[in-house]
Image (spheres, helix red, strand yellow):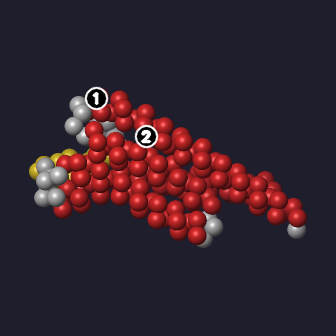
Amino acid sequence: MKKSIIAKSVATFIIIGLIFLISSAGIHEYIHLKVLSLLGGDGYIVLLSEYTAADTVIITPPSNYTLYALSGGIFTALMFLALAYFAWSKKFTEMFAALIPVILMETFYGIFEGAFWSLPVEQYMAFAYPIVIGAGLTGLYISIYILYKDLKQKLLSFSVR
C-alpha cells in the first residue's frame, strides 16, 4: 500500500510537470504575440525554430521592445504562480511541486530575455540555456524536497491508522 501511494504521487508529479513544461513554451510565445500586437507590432509563432521549441517571428517591431521581450517569461510565470497558489490552497502537492521548476525557468528566462534581447543570437543562447537549465534544476530540487516532505507526512499518517 505504501509503495502505491509513493508511485501514484511520483507519477502524478511527473505527468503534470511534463504537461506544464511542454505547454509553457506555447503559452510564453502566445503572450509575446499578444503583447507584440498591443505594442503596435505584428508577427506570428513558429514551432521548432532553429534555437527553441517555439519562437515569435516579428514582421513589424513593437514600440517598446524591452517590454515585449520581458512579457513572455514574466506573464507565463505569473500565470503558473496563480496555478501554484490554487494547487497549494487545495493541498494538491504534486501539482504545486511540478509548477516550481517551470515558474523559476520562466521567471529567470523572462528577466534575461528582457535585459539582453539585443545580444547576437548565438551569444544570447550561450547564456540563456545555462540560466534556464540552472533555474529548472534548482526548481526540481525544491520540488523533490516538497514532494518528499508530503509523502513522508502521508506515510506517517497512514501507518498511525
What's the residue at 67%, 57% (across, down)?
9
Disc 2, SS: helix
Left or right of residue 120: residue 80 = right
Residue 127 can be seen in this image:
yes
What's the residue at 53%, 40% (across, down)?
137
**Residue 140 in the image: x percent, y percent?**
57, 45
Q: Which residue is mark 1?
A: 122
Viewer-closest of 138 and 41: 138
Question: Against 72, is 154 above or below?
Answer: below
Viewer-closest of 80 and 26: 80
Left or right of residue 94: residue 106 = left
Q: Quadrant of residue 38?
A: bottom left
What's the residue at 88%, 68% (across, down)?
161
- Mark identifier at residue 35: none
What's the residue at 29%, 28% (across, down)?
123
Q: Quadrant of residue 48?
A: top left
Q: Which residue is mark 2?
A: 132
Labels 2 and 1 touching (C-beta < 8 A): no
Disc 1, SS: helix
Dot 2 or dot 1, earlier in sequence = 1
Name which residue type carries label 1: Glu
**Residue 160 in the image: x percent, y percent?**
88, 64
Name which residue type carries label 2: Val
Q: Quadrant of residue 131?
A: top left
